[in-house]
Image (cartoon, grey):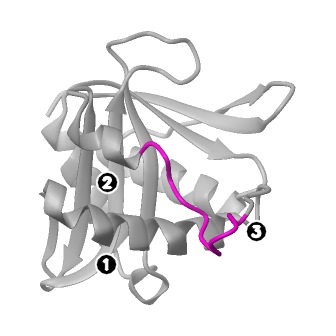
Amino acid sequence: MQIDVLPATPDQQPILANLLELYSHDFSEFVEVKLGADGRFGYPRLPLYWRETHRHPFLIRADGELAGLVLVQQGSQITGAPEIWDVAEFFILRSYRRHGVGLQAALAVWQRFTGDWEIRVTARNTGAHDFWQRTISTFTGQPTQSELKESASKSQYLFSFRSLA
């Protein structure tokens, strides 16, 4: 299967918004995500991905078909360190999961942006934790471990690694 991770253009913002609705629905299994009065979850920060230079939106295609999205930003959500790359959101449509699409998409993103990376995973999302642990280990060629970070509002695992691509 040919996997492409393509920068999303401003005119593709509605496509990303639709995919983020599906992502939010899936994610609501693990954290409280409220529907708006319009019946949509919404993603208020989405327009910033075309206005702020430290944000990068991507569409994922598998054999030319829409398969997911990845939103990348620079700046640690844990420490605030500005040089850290962060996967803000990562979503693969269910029909493409367990076919290597997520793995190939993640590897393509990490090869595009060299430097230190952080991946945050909601503690209750054990499937995502396992996926990121396998994927990062594949990328680095070394076993990887996460660190549990607790705050008043959330409990999440943090993976840290470096891309030298």
Closer to viewer: mark 3 or mark 2:
3
Please count the marks in the image. 3
Indicate the quadrant where residue 99 lies.
Answer: bottom left
Viewer-side residue, 151 vs 41: 41
Closer to viewer: mark 2 or mark 1:
1
Q: Residue at x 36, y 66 (%)?
A: 102
Q: Residue at x 49, y 47 (%)?
A: 44
Q: Is 3 on the left or on the right of 89, as rendered?
A: left
Q: Quadrant of the C terminus?
A: top left
Crowding at label 2, few (<14), some or many (≥20) Cα neighbours within 10 Å? Answer: many
Q: Which residue is mark 1?
A: 67
Q: Spatial distance from mark 2 to mark 1, Cα to Cα? A: 13 Å
Q: Which residue is mark 3?
A: 29
Q: Which mark is residue 106?
A: 2
Q: Any magenta on residue 41?
A: yes
Main secondary structure of the magenta stretch? loop
Give the magenta-colored segment's residue range. 35-45
Q: Which mark is residue 130?
A: none
CB of mark 2 within 8 Å of CB of mark 1? Answer: no
Q: Amino acid at mark 2?
A: Ala
Q: Amino acid at mark 1?
A: Ala
Q: Is residue 109 visible?
A: yes
Crowding at label 3, few (<14), some or many (≥20) Cα neighbours within 10 Å? Answer: few
Q: Spatial distance from mark 3 to mark 2, Cα to Cα? A: 23 Å
Q: Residue at x 22, y 41 (%)?
A: 50
Q: Position of residue 108 (x, y in %)?
A: 19, 53
- In the rendered structure, which disc, 3 or 1, sits on the residue that comes first in sequence? 3
